[in-house]
Image (spheres, rainbow, N blue to C red):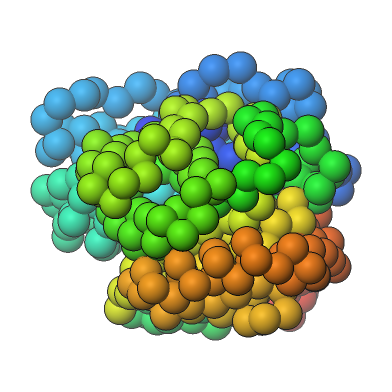
Amino acid sequence: MRVAYVCADPGVPVFGTKGSSVHIQEVVRALAMHGASIEIFATSFDGEAPDDLRGAGVHWLSALPKGDIAARERASLGANLGLHAMLRGAGRFDLVYERYSIWSYAGMEYARDEGIPGILEVNAPLIEEQAQHRGLVDRGSAEQVAQRVFDAAATIVVVSTEIASYLERYEGVSERVHVVPNGVNPERFHPQVSPLFPSDPEVFTVGFVGTLKPWHGLPVLAAAFAELHASNPDTRLLVGGTGPERESLSAQLAEGGCLHATTFTGPLQPDQVPALLASMNVGVAPYPATGNFYFSPLKVYEYMASGLPVVASAIGQIQEIIDDGVNGLLCPPGDSGAFGAAFKSLRQSPELAARLGSAARRSMVESHTWLMAVGKILALAEDAMSSTTSTRGDS
């Protein structure tokens, strides 16, 4: 099976260190494990491919201008002609798999015109995100492109039920939408990994991994750890990653009297993350309350596959993968007291921590691997192909 993987989003470097980059790498890796030969068409790559992905072909899409937002939007829209030509020039494909980006539609239209399955993966309400966080000039055209690419896709895969609900606003789309949550690679994340930041066995380490952004609930993390550290000085906080909230988080930890017990790792390469998680006693996902929690958080899957007990907000998809008290602990979003109490209970009961961590690992291996997720997507592609063939036969 020959697969064209398309990512026209310049903010998602295929071989980068962002969560979105890791997501692409894991999907491509799982496709290869299912026997696919992969050609990657992308605007940004950002570095060398991991050793096990060097067999994938690499095709650079047109670079986009920096600065003026309107000019960038026009260039992004115009880049569809180049993408379509590159796909046609790369030989026959059996499947086109595209990570949805705001201005790209050529991949799905190429697949439709060639009579092959086009799978569109939607990870977020990108138009709303762009307008709120980065700036969007021509929203009308962005909405038209969205409807166009959704119409062309044979199957639309979304990572959460919240994204599926969001797509109901687009006409004629909902019947082709399928929820396939994110997964984890249990061969990379497992309890036997050696720690990147080892500590004394008596020290209890609370850990967080992710880009330090406002929607990660970092003030709750700071307050909860300060509460734990005040009564248990043999504790530390390990923060993996960097981002715009770094200074604010440092200030909050200093105010809580626990900055000295905190280690900020700075940027990490994907192959360092399993060893970082092996340095923790508990993984935390303190997302704040929000009216539209559409995430399928990679960090939660990776914590759990690593055999860590997880303390997370009871919100969105997290409530579907964590059974409170069975394979993790759930807390009300924004309740630092509840998070602090959960940390203390795990600190005081290694048996509870071990039981939750073992159950977490087991639930990931049994139900949430990338290999399983991509297998479901390939089955959807096969169904789409069968439906297309049947329709042609009837006509």
Task: State whether residue 110 appears in this view.
Answer: no
Which residue is depicted at the point 72% across and 42% down?
201
Residue 129, quarter of the rendered image: bottom left
Q: Is residue 296 above or below residue 88?
A: below
Residue at the outermost top position: 48
Which quadrant is the C terminus positioned in? bottom right
- Report the side of 164 relative to 144 (left or right): right
Quadrant for residue 230, please give it.
Answer: bottom left
Residue at 81 percent of width and 48 percent of height: 191
- State the residue in front, 354 or 114: 354
Which of the two residues, 329 or 134, is positioned nearer the viewer here? 329
Seen from the viewer's position, the closer of residues 228 and 383 is 228
What residue do we see at 17% from left, 60% from top? 140
Question: Which residue is pictured at 45% across the width and 67% down the height?
Answer: 340
The reply, left or right, for residue 21 in relation to residue 305 is left
- The relative height of residue 95 versus residue 174 in the rendered view (above or below) is above
Q: Can residue 65 be seen in the rendering of this structure? A: yes
Q: Quadrant of residue 51?
A: top right
Task: Point out residue 163 in the picture as x, y percentages from the top left corner.
Answer: 45, 72
125 sits left or right of 69 in the view: right
Q: Position of residue 257 (x, y in %)?
A: 31, 46
Where residue 48 appears, as percent x and y from the top left, is 61, 17
